[in-house]
Amino acid sequence: MQIKGFIDEIRDLGGIKFFKMNTSEGYIQITINKNQVDNKILEKFNSLTRQSCIIVEGKKVDNPKAPQGFEILPEDIKILSIAHTPLPLDPSGKTQAELDTRLDWRSLDLRHPRNRAIFKIQSKIVQGMTEYLNENGFMQVFTPCLMGAASEGGSEVFPVAYFDKEAFLRQDPQLHRELTILGGIEKLFDLGPSWRAELSHTTRHLCEHRACAVELAFIKDEYDVMKVEQELMIAAIKKVKQDCEKELELLEVDLQVPKLPFPILEFPKVYDILAEFGKKYEVGEDYDRESEVILWKYVKEKYKADFFFVNRFPFAVKPFYVMRVDEDPTWARSVDMIYKGVELSSGGQREHRYEKLIEQVKEKKINLDSVEWFVKFFKYGAPTLGGFAVGLERLTMQMLDIKNVREAVLFPRTPERLLP
């Protein structure tokens, strides 16, 4: 049997020597009986340090006291790399390190099985989503990350030198998703990164994040969008439960499949709910971070649910491209999905009528020239459409009850962190 990995622990009891290997399948014990192995193996054993990378060929023997219920009696040890000492970080986790130190030495940090488990689960979240979308007729597309104009306006963009011009890293792929819908692709999704130049230092913000963004045409209203989004969440969670039993157990997470349909809270009634908890807002105002948590506790108590939607936000706080409620234009067909008190996505129905788009551009006091590249296509026929984008790191964080979203990113990008 061949075992490949890193040495996590070394014990020398004289006649018997042990080392525990950290492999992609978990910890495996290697046992060396001094009187039963070749001297070359002993010499190699004596040269090893913790976190050295090796390949062991040997015989598998049952041992109920070993981590996996068996041990390997080595017949050959191939040393790929000897780790320097002392280590800058203890990958076993026995010596705790601050998150910043862990991220400084991320490759060593990822050697802990618990940390690797997070990304196995994140991979299965994406797999569950893509399986659902493919099975339901959505086409995967790839929209640009470089923008000639800020996709949502404002100053939260990263400028990029683009030959003799200034470009921007996208904040969201939504506008190009809409244009793709106008091209006749009725159902699509896009998996990729987005960037926001926010000087935020919260446990849920990143300067670079990834999302599963979905768009669909010929919808009746925003409720069609919510139906797809909640089914997408169910598919992701079921996939994780099916394929990540060991990882969930390692992380001590009891993951439950939520019931359908997700509860929906709508403005202006949202104001009444928040007022009951002492949070008072004027009509037309957006709510704050604390209110998201209050609404979750309300939904948890009333509906026994962790997922829910908030719909019909005030148009005053939403971008020009959202569709308003024609009967009462104070409100927009704009939807957030919240999971355990944290917003995972923003979406809803988009405005497809050219004249209405132009009205809303003017109302938002946006220079028409800056969005002409987008709105001009709506002159030539556009279906009703809507969509959403689910943040993958936030979904992972909330699913696994992780305290800081940076732990759900391999190499996070924050205002202070651009390396490694």
Image (spheres, helix red, strand yellow):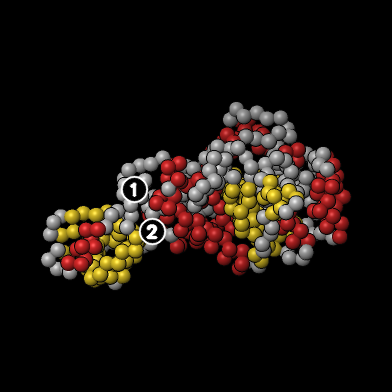
**Residue 67 shows in the view:** no
Left or right: 104 as drawn, with respect to 136:
left
Question: Mark 2 or mark 1: which is in front?
Answer: 1
Say few, some or many: other residues with alpha carbon within 10 Å of mark 1 (under 14 / 14 to 19 / 20 or more): few
Quadrant hosting residue 193: bottom right
Q: Residue at x 40, y 56 (%)?
A: 247
* Residue displayed at 59% across by 48% down: 208
| Residue depicted at x 58% and y 37% | 200
Q: Which quadrant is home to the N terminus? A: bottom left
Numbered mark located on residue 87 in the image: 1
Q: Residue furthest front?
A: 164
Find residue 144 and report its horizontal and vertical position in percent: 69, 57
Asked whether the viewer can see residue 176, the reply is yes
Give the vertical position of 209 relative to 341 (above or below): below
Residue 187's place in the image compared with 102, above or below, is: below
Q: Is residue 91 left or right of 60 when viewed as pictured?
A: right
Circle 2 sits on which residue? 246
Q: CA distance from mark 2 to mark 1?
A: 28 Å
Between 249 and 24, the one nearer to me in the picture: 24
Q: Position of residue 237 (x, y in %)?
A: 51, 57
> Which sits earlier in the primary sequence, circle 2 or circle 1?
1
Kindly state the secondary structure of the residue where label 1 is placed.
loop
- Number of marks in the image? 2
Residue 361: where, in percent of width, then height?
82, 44
Q: Position of residue 221 (x, y in %)?
A: 74, 53
| Residue type for callout 2 | Lys
Amino acid carrying mark 1 in the image: Leu
